[in-house]
Image (cartoon, rainbow, N blue to C red):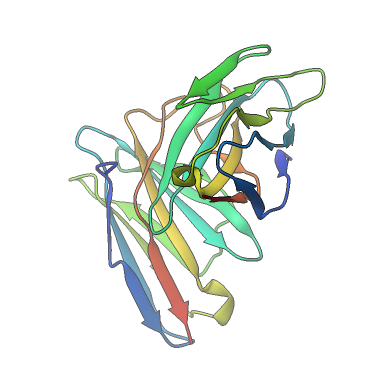
């Protein structure tokens, strides 16, 4: 079945550091890929998405590129802020097969001033 | 604020009991999804309803059931509760039943003692 694997956290960075959170997936066909963010005490919010190979999703300084050849969708940000501290989830959705999301285990990011 | 509301925010109960979690989708959304977030299983899709009808089923136990009412709100019923059912239960909604962005509620934290 479908699965998503992302690096375990916590990831601890200083403010303005470069961020990479790795995500790889296994799925039949060509799924859509997502990054969600969960701030403390809140539900998940869609951060960015990509629906086909080589697409780059971007939002709020975060970006991720859909790499079919390596089945990856790594999240990057050039300069993190304290306010980016949260849990990040990589997810996939098989196209034309319903709308259910398959999530990775989540990666907690802690940014120190 | 995603526009999806869930009640109650917290629920503490004993093993063997039954509880009902409630979700109100965003105005205009016809689809409701339930997800369970636990420490050992991560974030898992449970079930989806679209306009009152069950649309997709994930890893939902037989002790759990759900329904979507004519006003589109949904309830998740958990019975014969076990310690392992302690988790955060999220509801999400989307406009349609397939390939639409899901908006997540803040979750209901269930603790089974």
Residue B77: x, y in percent? 38, 66
Q: Nearer the viewer, residue A77 or B42?
A: A77
Q: Residue at x 64, y 60 (%)?
A: B41
Residue A107 falls left or right of residue B112: right
Picture quarter with the N terminus of chain B: top left
Q: Where on the picture, by quarter, is residue A31?
A: top right
Q: Where on the picture, by quarter, is residue A15?
A: top right
Q: Residue at x 41, y 29 (%)?
A: B101
Extreme top residue here? A54
Q: Nearer the viewer, residue A15 or A70?
A: A15
Q: Where on the picture, by quarter, is residue B48?
A: top left
Q: Is residue A66 above or below residue A38?
A: above
Residue B79 seen from this side: no
Residue A104: x, y in percent? 65, 45
Residue A5 seen from this side: yes
Residue A111: x, y in percent? 55, 49
């Amino acid at each position: 079945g479908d699965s998503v694997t992302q690096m375990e956290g916590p990831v601890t960075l200083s403010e303005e550091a470069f961020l990479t959170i790795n995500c790889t997936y296994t799925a039949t066909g060509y799924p859509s890929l997502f990054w969600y963010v969960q701030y403390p005490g809140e539900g998940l919010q869609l951060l960015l998405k990509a629906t086909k190979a080589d697409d780059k999703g971007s939002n709020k300084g975060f970006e991720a590129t859909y790499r079919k050849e390596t089945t990856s969708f790594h999240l990057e940000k050039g300069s993190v802020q304290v306010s980016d501290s949260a849990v990040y989830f990589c997810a996939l959705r098989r196209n034309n097969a319903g709308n259910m999301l398959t999530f990775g285990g989540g990666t907690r990011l802690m940014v120190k001033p | 604020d995603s526009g999806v509301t869930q009640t109650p925010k917290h629920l503490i109960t004993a093993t063997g009991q039954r509880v009902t979690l409630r979700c109100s989708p965003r105005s205009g959304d016809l689809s409701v999804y339930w997800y369970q977030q636990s420490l050992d299983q991560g974030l898992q899709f449970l079930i989806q309803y679209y306009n009152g009808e069950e649309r997709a089923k994930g890893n939902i136990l037989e002790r759990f059931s759900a329904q979507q009412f004519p006003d589109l709100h949904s309830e998740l019923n958990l019975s014969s509760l076990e310690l392992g059912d302690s988790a955060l239960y999220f509801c999400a909604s989307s406009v349609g039943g397939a390939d639409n962005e899901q908006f997540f509620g803040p979750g209901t934290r269930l603790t089974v003692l």
